[in-house]
Amino acid sequence: MNFDLKTLELPAAATEKCDLLVVLVPEGFKPGRDALSTLAALALKQGDFSAKPGKSLPLYQVPAVAARRVLLLGVGDGSARSVRQALGATGAALKAPQTKRVVLCFAGSAQADAVCAAVQAVADASYVYTTTKPKAEARSLARVVVGVPDPSEVRVAFYQGVALVEGVEFAREWGNRPANHATPTMLANAAKTLAKQPRIQCKVMGPSEVERLGMGSFMAVAKGSEEPLRFIELRYSGGAKDQAPVVLVGKGITFDTGGISIKPAAEMDEMKFDMCGAASVLGVFRALAELQPAINVVGLIPACENMPDGRSVKPGDVVTSMSGQTIEVLNTDAEGRLILCDALTYAARFKPAAVVDIATLTGACVIALGGVRSGLFSNNDSLAQALQAAGESAQDPCWRMPLDDDYADGLKSNFADMGNVAGRAGGAITAAKFLQKFVGDMPWAHLDIAGTAWKGGAAKGSTGRPVGLLVQYLLDRESDAASAAKPTAKRARAKAA
């Protein structure tokens, strides 16, 4: 799908030939004398239409309007949140087979973040999964024109929105694939395709390399599967060579049966989504390829299946992690933390500015926060605040949870340095406390996306979250670094003078 940004106000929008013209009407709309303004004003006056977010009025072959169909769409205060909410309800119109070219026209002023949100909302509402549905109708929407009064004011935000669409859809695609179409090897191959993009490199390690690294915890989880594990290392080099990178670590359990501690059969199919943390890291790198920011980022993905087998790790087994710490595996269904801990130890070699791990880690986080906010845990207040602010800005919110040391008491073991579970109470927190044992003094955050990475029921599918949050965080870091460098440059010039 192609997006274009165009200077377009309502009089000119009426002349645009398209299958669907969406007029984004804000509260307090001030009509002109053109046909679309007159139409919207009359509909508002008669009460047939409201400018509240999501309210709409579909029209067909309106006189003096070139578009075959017109949709008046209320966007409330015109904020990014209202625009996204409104466009999110237009899926049926955007997915219609006859809808190939759409024009979005802001009937009032266009805020930069609202334009970014509009691009993402259209892509989200029109998304269609087809990889393993050969008879499904592919996305018919091919081109979207976003019309605003002054493109120069929103151009950066528009292209950020387009890049986020690429990243989120890459993550959704891999999240939605069945496990036999998204094995660890296939996931590694997807990462290799990203290395064809500028400034991105990819390294893939197999069982022998992982064994040499001493990743006994990761290897223990993979033992029960016929599919070989893969440890994926991605690097985006956009900053100076001496700039410390941000390391993103994504949980890549491509299917989770629970292992010997096997899960109930009901809804086990949804455990194909247990690699959505990994998918989000891939999505971030896809977006970075488009945005090309001046930062350095490393992506680490430990990928394997968790299967029951004669070779599988058993409850009560003790494994040795890459850090040298031993772990008593009390529950084999708490496997995500077992692969992440070795990846977090590996992350230290990059001397990172920050480490963020992303994982569908606990059902407890779903109980705590539902599907609205991801759980955020961190040992660093500045990092936590930056991630939370990025989430709010990107409309991909998270919520900080506690990390009191007392929560780690349940992880004590009589037979190892720690157990891998600590009972039901505070399960999302104790999982985070387990991971914290492997980060040392690195600035670290853990995003538990078990409630936000996918939806169940009739809307079953990957959401692509938290790609938006992570990309916004990285762009904010780039902006902060640029701002900090300017005074330094000024002082240097003054000293030279």
Image (cartoon, rainbow, N blue to C red):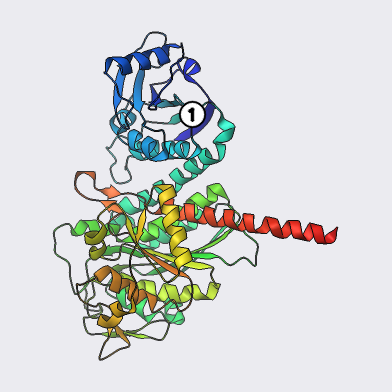
> Where in the figure is residue 401, as x and y percent of width and height?
33, 65
Q: Residue at x 49, y 44 (%)?
A: 163
Q: Is residue 52 visible?
A: yes
The residue carrying pointer 1 sits among few (fewer than 14), some (14 to 19) or many (20 or more) residues within 10 Å by Cα, namely some
Whether residue 146 is situated above or below residue 448 in the rendered picture: above
Amino acid type, mark 1: Ser
Residue found at the far front of this picture:
28
**Residue 409 location (% of width, % of height):** 27, 82
Left or right: 306 in relation to 282: left
Quadrant hosting residue 66: top left
Location of residue 88 (image quadrant): top left
Q: Residue farthest to the right? A: 497
In percent of width and height, residue 200 lies at 56, 57
Residue that numbered label 1 is attached to: 109
Residue at 28% across, 31% down: 92
- Using the image as rendered, state which of residue 433 and residue 463 is in the foreground: 433
For the C terminus, give its image quadrant.
Answer: bottom right
Q: As rendered, which of 19 and 486 lies closer to the eye? A: 486
**Residue 60 visible here:** no
Residue 190 placement (x, y as % from top left): 43, 56
Q: Which of the pair 423/300 is nearer the observer?
A: 423
Q: Left of 68 or right of it: where is 450?
A: left
* Foreground pick, 418 / 329: 418
